[in-house]
């Protein structure tokens, strides 16, 4: 009774102050629209880091000495012949200079054949000699070019800075989070565009191809592709608008739900800059998810309102009735959606937390726009007999359709449905267990395999022994550890062991370089390519390796081992990290500590482990919150089971779908998984709430379900089909992660709808036997 009294009080408050509330919404919407003009794309490398993870603590501790994971590789590849031509070296030198002066580049860590930190050493009659690979007095004559070729071989940079077949060379640069020249946060999208303008467009020619990879380039390409995201959203919006019109048979009743959903998106985006947030390129699709949720709930209100109008109520009475009927179910459904997004905030990765905040704000706004603004607008809509005739025609056309689905509430069909559900459960458990945490394809999974970036990445990986995919194990030891034979041997054995792990392309460590130098001291004899036991000889072997090489720090207490991987697929990362841990735990050497990890693959490994550790607690919290809210509303364990079991089955099948389509569980797909739970609950709560109201009137389950289908089921089926058609257009997006989301969302909308109208009544047939009786 208290709840009914509260609803009645809210009804009076809302409908007695319609103009005031409308004025409030208009004013706030205008303010939010203005605020949206201040919204900026906010991409940052540090946002992708789970900074509290063990690996990232290592990364933060040592990134000043050895650079971070945010680097750019620029490969200049010859189309014919090799690099030893005057034209190529002139181009490489000019490109190196241009990279050096790009904003945000850590100039001390720029590496190229023309930078002074790329050196060689050799044994001569008087001892050891060395110098820059490209001498200061270099002239691009045949003799000068031949000398550089020999220096490249002496420096051991073949496969690292120079292609294995001498068809190209690399310029490597580390990017800072803060642009030193401006003191402001580095704009990675701007850097990406400058790489195109100042490097690719400038130096791409008939003789030379330019290939660029790195985090900044990924963000820039995603942002460029995101411009077409707007096009796909417009297509989805038009499709949704047309189908809403076919459903409502009224222009005004089509515009109202679409308008309310757009207002929710405007409020959501307007709140972000007011709260100090931007929007990350990875989160650009979240507003579209909010629009989809808004339309889904708005259609239910339109359906309830239309049913009242058909029964003879005027617009005000119909709007009030719809408000009363859907206030609690709608609030619980939207609260479930909000909780679904809030829980992913548990993952301590800033980009995921910002997506959670963005989505939660949107759903919270929908509570206002759909449960307050929408019924107020409907109260002003005047419908005549012509509209009622169109509604009657629609009901008559759909009646055979509903009678077919009504059979799912009868015992024999219900048994068949439950058997199919059990079989699907088994399939979901089988395939769902194969879902991978992280990326499942070579290249950048956010982009298509034929995108320019992934083609560039494939070219670099093919011609060099390294790529942009590297995980660096930090080896900590005592000061002057690099002249201790036992310590150097332990590191060398680790590097050799990892070099033979499947998925590893190559490894680089100080002991390997020291062995080459030691061999050089002994006329280049291969039998002397070993670590010397004599400390003085060891000093000779490592003394010519500068700290700028990234292989040691100033006091030789830290010596990284760089492990270049063939790709960054989830399976590859997991295998390499597991092998590092196994070796670390089983091979113990005094004063040697192996710490994971820096490098971009180290970041991915930490992210994957963070997502893996959080996914099941997130699902537990989401389902726990949904169960609590449903139990609070329906006060029956059996009722809760009718709603939750279809939801759980669809969530499991979503994992199976991800496995089949090789979609990994990662930053871009986590919100979709949370959304799937929310949308499923929406359908189930609306269907069951209406079903229970008819059961309480004394109808049998079959009668009650038939009437439920004619009203609420109508809206559920329409919403599921409409939104599935709209988001299915995303499958053709140039952004792979949007296409993956299109596949998942299409599946979620359709299968959650089928679960609500087929499995829910089949469960009710056996779980609600007492309520079956008139």
Image (spheres, helix red, strand yellow):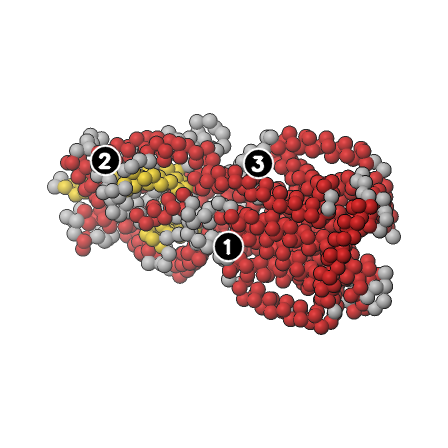
Where does residue 453 sit, x and y in percent of width and height? 41, 43
Q: Is residue 502 above or below residue 206?
A: below
Viewer-proximal residue among 735 and 366: 735
Which of pointers 1 and 2 indicates the residue nearer the eye? 1
Q: Position of residue 369 (x, y in %)?
A: 72, 41
Which residue position holds label 3?
A: 278
Tell me which numbered mark, 1 or 2, is placed earlier along the sequence.
Answer: 2
The residue that label 1 is drawn on is: 664
Residue depicted at 60% across the width and 66% down the height: 425
Query: What separation in Å lies between label 2 and label 3 (alpha carbons)?
Result: 45 Å
For mark 2, give the secondary structure.
loop
Q: Residue furthest left?
A: 125
Q: Position of residue 537 (x, y in %)?
A: 22, 47
Measured from the top left, where is residue 2 in percent x and y? 86, 50
**Can residue 471 be seen here?**
yes
Closer-to-camera residue (466/269): 269
Q: Residues within 10 Å of mark 2 (few under 14, many from 20)?
A: many
Mark 1 and mark 2: Cα distance apart in space: 45 Å
Secondary element at tag 3:
loop
Does residue 183 lie above or below 151 as drawn?
A: above
* Crowd rating for badge 3 (residues with CA inside 10 Å; few <14, some 14–19, many 20+): many
Residue under numbered circle 2: 134
């Amino acid at each position: 009774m208290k709840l009914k009294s509260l609803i009645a009080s809210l009804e009076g408050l809302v409908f007695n102050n319609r103009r005031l509330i409308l004025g409030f919404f208009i004013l706030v919407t205008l303010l939010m629209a203005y605020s949206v003009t201040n919204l900026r794309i906010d991409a940052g490398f540090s946002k992708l880091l789970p900074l509290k993870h063990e690996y990232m603590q290592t990364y933060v501790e040592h990134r000043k000495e050895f650079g971070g994971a945010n680097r750019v590789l620029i490969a200049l590849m010859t189309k014919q012949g090799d690099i030893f031509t005057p034209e190529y070296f002139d181009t490489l030198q000019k490109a190196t200079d241009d990279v050096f002066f790009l904003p945000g580049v850590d100039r001390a860590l720029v590496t190229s054949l023309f930078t002074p930190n790329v050196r060689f050493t050799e044994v001569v009659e008087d001892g050891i000699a060395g110098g820059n690979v490209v001498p200061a007095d270099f002239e691009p004559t045949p003799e000068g070019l031949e000398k550089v070729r020999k220096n490249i071989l002496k420096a051991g940079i073949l496969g690292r800075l120079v292609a294995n077949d001498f068809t190209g060379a690399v310029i490597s640069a580390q990017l800072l989070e803060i642009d030193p020249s401006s003191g402001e946060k580095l704009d990675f999208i701007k850097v990406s565009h400058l790489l195109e303008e100042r490097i690719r467009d400038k130096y791409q020619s008939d003789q030379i191809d330019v290939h660029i990879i790195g985090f900044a380039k990924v963000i820039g390409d995603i942002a460029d592709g995101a411009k077409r995201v707007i096009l796909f959203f417009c297509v989805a919006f038009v499709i949704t608008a047309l189908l809403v019109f076919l459903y409502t048979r009224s222009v005004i009743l089509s515009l109202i739900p679409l308008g309310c959903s757009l207002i929710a998106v405007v409020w959501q985006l307007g709140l972000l800059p007011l709260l100090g947030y931007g929007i990350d390129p990875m989160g650009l699709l979240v507003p579209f998810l909010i629009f989809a949720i808004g339309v889904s709930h708005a259609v239910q209100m339109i359906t309830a309102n239309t049913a009242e109008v058909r029964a003879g109520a005027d617009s005000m009475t119909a709007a009030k009735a719809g408000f009363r009927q859907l206030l609690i179910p709608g609030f619980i459904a939207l609260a479930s959606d909000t909780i679904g997004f809030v829980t992913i905030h548990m993952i301590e990765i800033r980009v995921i937390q910002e997506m959670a905040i963005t989505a939660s704000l949107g759903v919270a706004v929908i509570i206002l726009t759909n449960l307050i603004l929408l019924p107020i607008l409907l109260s002003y809509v005047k419908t005549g007999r012509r509209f009622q005739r169109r509604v009657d025609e629609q009901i008559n056309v759909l009646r055979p359709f509903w009678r077919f689905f009504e059979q799912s509430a009868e015992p024999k069909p219900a048994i068949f449905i439950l058997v199919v559900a059990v079989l699907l459960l088994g399939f979901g458990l089988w395939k769902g267990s194969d879902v991978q945490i992280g990326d499942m394809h070579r290249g950048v999974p956010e982009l298509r395999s034929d995108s320019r970036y992934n083609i560039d990445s494939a070219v670099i990986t093919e011609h060099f022994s390294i790529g942009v995919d590297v995980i660096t194990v930090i080896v900590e030891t005592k000061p002057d550890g690099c002249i201790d034979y036992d310590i150097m041997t332990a590191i060398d054995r680790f590097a050799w062991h990892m070099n033979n792990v499947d998925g590893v392309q190559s490894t680089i460590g100080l002991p390997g370089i020291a062995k080459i130098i030691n061999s050089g001291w002994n006329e280049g004899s291969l039998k002397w390519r070993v670590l010397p036991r004599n400390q003085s000889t060891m000093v000779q072997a490592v003394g010519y390796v500068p700290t700028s090489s990234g292989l040691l720090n100033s006091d030789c207490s830290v010596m990284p081992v760089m492990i270049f991987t063939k790709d960054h697929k989830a399976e590859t990362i997991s295998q390499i990290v597991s092998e590092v841990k196994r070796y670390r735990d089983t091979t113990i050497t005094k004063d040697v500590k192996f710490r994971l990890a820096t490098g971009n693959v180290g970041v991915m490994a930490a992210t994957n482990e963070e997502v893996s550790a959080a996914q099941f607690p997130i699902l537990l919290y989401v389902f726990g919150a949904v169960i609590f809210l449903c139990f609070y509303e329906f006060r029956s364990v059996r009722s809760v089971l009718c709603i939750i079991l279809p939801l759980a089955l669809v969530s499991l099948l979503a994992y199976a779908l991800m496995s089949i389509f090789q979609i990994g569980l990662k930053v871009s797909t986590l919100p979709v998984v949370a959304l799937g739970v929310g949308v499923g609950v929406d359908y189930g709560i609306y269907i069951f709430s209406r079903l229970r109201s008819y059961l309480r009137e004394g109808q049998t389950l079959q009668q009650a379900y038939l009437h439920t289908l004619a009203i609420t089921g109508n809206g559920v089926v329409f919403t599921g089909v409409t939104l599935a058609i709209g988001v299915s257009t995303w499958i053709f997006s140039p952004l792979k992660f949007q296409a993956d989301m299109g596949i998942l969302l299409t599946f979620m909308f359709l299968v959650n709808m089928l679960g609500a109208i087929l499995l829910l009544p089949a469960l009710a047939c056996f779980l609600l036997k007492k309520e079956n009786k008139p």
